[in-house]
Amino acid sequence: MTAAVFFFLFSIGFLVYVLAIYPVLLYLWAQALPRPIRKAPIRTRVSIVVPVRNGAPWVEAKIRSLLETNYPGDLIEILIVSDGSTDGSEDIVRSYPDPRVHLLALPPGGKAVAVNRGIESVSGEIVVLTDVRQTFDPDAIPRLLACFAEPAVGVVTGELVIREGASHEEFNTGLYWRYEKWIRRNLNRIDAMLGATGSIYAIRRELAPSIPADILLDDVYVPFAVAFRGSRIYFEDDAKAYDAPTALQAEFWRKVRTQAGVYQILIRFPALLSPFNRRFIHFLSHKLGRLLLPFALLGAAISSIFLPGPWRIAALGAQGIFYGLALTDPLIPERGPLKRLSAVVRTFVVLVAAAACALAVFVLPAQRLWKETRTTLARR
């Protein structure tokens, strides 16, 4: 019984630490010891690389939003890198009536290969990397570039804004993103960023590494490669890209891929687990902690069975209600009073389940974990 109590309390304590205590401690750290940077408008040639596979529904709007930037037009080039598109995306780019827009058509090879070839093919001192689906705010590019006025900055990432969802499911997906961005802002204040946002980030071209073809998270691999060479990763939350909300199923597959990618990052950068690395506590608490959440929940469930009588009943009953809410959430009416709670619980359970499924990266080819992200159409 003593062992059961220990493992139960340890599991619950771990969950509370990762989800609540660490973020609060991080916030206090960021308030006490901020490390700001110098920002100033700069004028330099910028190359925007957009890897695309079958992005016909979005590519024209993407190009238009990039060309509408509040940055000198003669200093911009846009390269759309088609990763074996077969849906007409390449024809849309070829026929686009602006000489600053170029197409690089490649056979299917994966996003990492497309990004590598794109960076090799452009000439700008700063390379902006982005996905096809999200549109940019007109001030996004100049605000990203202003951060490079600080010589120590090697990578700058912007903020992805998820538009308001119509359902509780979409709302909670957006709520999760807001929680993640709050953590990211605090990491940024103390120069401890753990990656970038793939839909909007920029890098000094001279620092750009070659990305291994099987890497799932170029937006984590590239910043860490730059950081381990001594440059800073900075989060500029005034540089915004916009996306439509995603359904929970799509968010599940995205989370499987991103969590699997963290395993890859850990293998490629083992120094992240060294206590002598200043990102150690943050990587351990945030990234690795999220990967271990499924095991903490499992540990709490198993140890509950062996708790002393009254505590066993309480613990198993509370977990039964918790998982019951998650399972019955799809059946609860959208406007029902219980929906607010059940939708949050279901979102949490699904995202933790995705972390467990990320272990598939050790038995499946990495590219098998890519799934098309389906979004709800929304107006900017």
Image: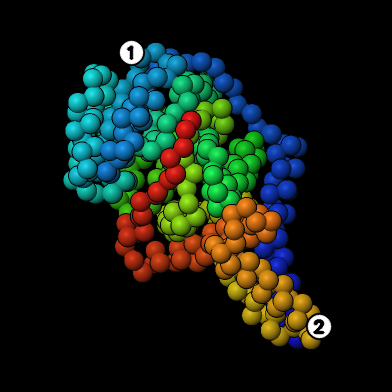
**Does 354 appear above or below 103?**
below
Q: CA distance from mark 1 to mark 2?
A: 73 Å
Q: Position of residue 340 (x, y in %)?
A: 66, 54
How many neighbours does mark 2 have within 10 angstroms: few (below 14), some (14-19), or many (20 or more)?
A: few
Which residue, given by chain and number where applicable, does mark 1 sit on? 74
- Say which amino acid is labelled 1: Asp
Residue 292 is marked as none
Query: Could you tell me if residue 349 is visible in this image?
Result: no
User: Front-most of 88 and 190?
Assistant: 88
**Does 370 appear above or below 223?**
below
Query: Could you tell me if residue 83 is visible in this image?
Result: yes
User: Front-most of 250 and 103?
Assistant: 250
Disc nearest the viewer among 1 and 2? 2
Q: Identify the secondary structure beneath mark 1.
A: helix
The extreme right residue here reads: 310
Which residue, given by chain and number where applicable, does mark 2 sit on? 310
How many numbered circles are shown?
2
Q: Position of residue 1 (x, y in %)?
A: 75, 86
In the picture, measured across the screen, residue 52 lies left or right of residue 373, that is left
Q: First in sequence: mark 1 or mark 2? A: 1
- Say which amino acid is labelled 2: Pro
**Does 357 appear above or below 92?**
below
Q: Residue at x 19, y 41 (%)?
A: 106
